[in-house]
Image (cartoon, rainbow, N blue to C red):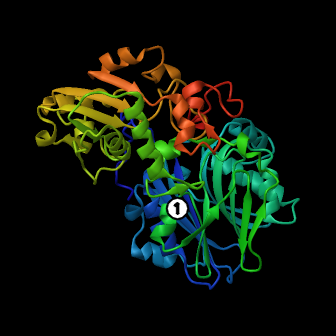
């Protein structure tokens, strides 16, 4: 693996997925590494930079943890031989895309921490907004950091709080009073599996069960993959502790009123897999609904509705259902190109967009096409996709976007960049349309966002409105320790 070159495709205009976490505890004592592997495969869409698995044998020597992590995709990083060596009946896994902390092997998770009370394995999805000050505080008391990621700050605080706590779950609760921001995490202690979600519920986390095995997962689709039954979502602010003695225990002392929660709306628009349910809402239904709303609010005469694969497809189907305009396949996506690949050099004729997508001339030629995508960030990809459709013979290209325009950065684990890099900042919709070369352009109305989640869940709209559920940092802290 060390010879592989992983180059991030920075000018790809898509938002990057967040991260995925997966935890398993088999009360019958069977090895869980291969089950974690399949869970991570199902969560691969949440991060393709690095991945890892850490396991422990609850009947073996206390504190012995076996772990393996590497850069790249899950099926590249783990062979049957790797998994065979990872003996243990409790474990956590992680797939990563970096929003804070560089793309290096050191920053791959899970993190394993040996300390006076034993060993912790931790996998985390999200971004802390007070990581720099917490890190400085730890450094001034002698802590030495091996990584540049927020997760290590969380792990240190749990370990430190554990010295004055009766249990690991109490230490997690005490750490939660200090850390601020977005996090869903799974923590493996020698005899317990713990899941925790930040009080706002930015990131998803759910519980599953298969016979005498319990699961914690970022998304329900991974539970389906391993044949587990969905038990319930972890509540925003809840800490769940799973052990053979007590089953699932719950601490809701950090839980806010439902109206104060703020889930990342992009889980429903783009990040999550469409076959997942998050907090009782079908991701597929949310995307179909977004397309229907676009057809109601921004109609246009056309011959064909297409989606930009994969994330635009469901919304395109919704637009077609509502408008009666036929839905078709306008692009072929190369399924074998991940988020990280060796990018064509600037001088070469290969386009990094066309390596991934190619229009189907027979489908679009001579047609007035409505193209649906989930977002436009910098606009660098949208203009090339529009150009490709025109070169394939599309008579008109009308773009509809199943989210409102990005006007503000995100500090909670999604890589929405600084305002001056956002195409919608200081530009009208007409000006953006002219820049990317469409005949017309329109976005999902901001008032529609609550309706995407049935009007009953608190959501974060900070990247559209600049109004965040908590005070954002005064400076952009993302990737702060890589500078």
Is there any visible trace of residue 135 in the rendered image? yes
The x and y percentages for residue 171 are 81, 58
Q: Quadrant of residue 475?
A: top right
Side of 341 relative to 269 (left or right)? left
Q: Nearer the viewer, residue 70 or 58?
A: 58
Q: Quadrant of residue 232?
A: bottom right
Side of 81 relative to 94 (left or right)? left
The x and y percentages for residue 282 are 50, 54
Name the residue rendered at 73%, 40% in the picture.
260
The x and y percentages for residue 329 are 22, 46
Identify the residue under disc 1.
220
Q: Nearer the viewer, residue 313 or 478?
A: 313
**Secondary structure beneath label 1:** helix
In the rendered image of this protein, does residue 56 appear above or below residue 448? Answer: below
Q: Quadrant of residue 121?
A: bottom right
Quadrant in which the C terminus is drawn: top right
Name the residue rendered at 44%, 58% in the picture.
275
The x and y percentages for residue 311 are 38, 45
Is there any visible trace of residue 116 in the rendered image? no
Side of 86 relative to 472 (left or right)? left
Quadrant in which the N terminus is drawn: bottom left
């Amino acid at each position: 693996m060390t010879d592989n070159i992983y180059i991030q495709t920075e000018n790809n205009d898509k938002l990057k997925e967040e991260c995925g976490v997966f935890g398993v505890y088999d009360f019958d004592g069977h090895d869980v590494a291969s089950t974690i592997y399949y869970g991570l495969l199902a969560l691969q869409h949440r991060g393709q930079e690095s991945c890892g698995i850490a396991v422990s044998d609850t009947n073996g020597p206390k504190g012995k943890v076996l772990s393996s992590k590497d850069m790249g995709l899950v099926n590249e990083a783990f062979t049957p031989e790797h998994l065979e060596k990872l003996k243990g009946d409790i474990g956590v896994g992680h797939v990563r895309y970096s929003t804070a902390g560089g793309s290096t092997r050191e920053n791959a998770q899970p993190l394993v921490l040996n300390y006076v009370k034993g060993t912790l394995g931790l996998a985390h999805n999200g971004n802390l907004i007070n990581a720099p000050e917490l890190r400085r505080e730890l450094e001034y008391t002698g802590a030495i950091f091996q990584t540049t990621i927020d997760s290590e700050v969380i792990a240190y605080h749990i370990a430190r709080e554990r010295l004055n706590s009766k249990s690991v779950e109490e230490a997690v609760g005490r750490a939660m009073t200090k850390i601020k921001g977005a996090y869903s995490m799974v923590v493996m202690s020698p005899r317990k599996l713990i899941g925790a979600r930040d009080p706002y519920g930015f990131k998803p986390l759910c519980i599953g069960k298969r016979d005498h095995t319990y699961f914690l997962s970022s998304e329900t689709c991974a539970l389906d993959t391993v044949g587990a039954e969905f038990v319930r979502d972890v509540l925003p602010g809840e800490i769940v502790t799973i052990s053979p003695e007590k089953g699932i225990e719950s601490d809701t002392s950090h839980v806010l009123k439902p109206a104060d929660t703020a889930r990342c709306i992009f889980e429903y628009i783009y990040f999550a897999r469409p076959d997942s349910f998050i907090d009782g809402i079908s991701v597929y239904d949310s995307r179909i609904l977004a397309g229907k709303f676009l057809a109601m609010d921004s109609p246009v005469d056309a011959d064909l509705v297409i989606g930009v694969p994969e994330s635009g497809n469901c919304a395109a189907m919704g637009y077609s259902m509502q408008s009666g305009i036929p839905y078709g396949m306008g692009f072929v996506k190369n399924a074998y190109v991940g988020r990280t690949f060796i990018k064509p050099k600037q001088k070469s004729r290969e386009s990094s967009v066309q390596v991934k997508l190619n229009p189907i001339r027979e489908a679009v030629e001579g047609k007035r096409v409505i193209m649906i995508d989930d977002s436009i960030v910098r606009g660098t990809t949208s203009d090339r996709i529009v150009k490709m459709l025109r070169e394939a013979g599309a008579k008109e290209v009308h773009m509809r976007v199943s989210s409102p325009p990005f006007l503000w950065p995100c500090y909670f684990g999604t890589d929405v960049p600084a305002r001056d890099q956002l195409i919608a900042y200081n530009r009208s919709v007409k000006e953006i349309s002219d820049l990317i070369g469409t005949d017309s352009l329109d976005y999902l109305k901001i008032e529609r966002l609550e309706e995407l989640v049935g009007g009953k869940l608190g959501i974060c709209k900070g990247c559209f409105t600049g109004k965040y559920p908590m005070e954002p940092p005064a400076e952009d802290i993302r990737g702060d320790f890589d500078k």
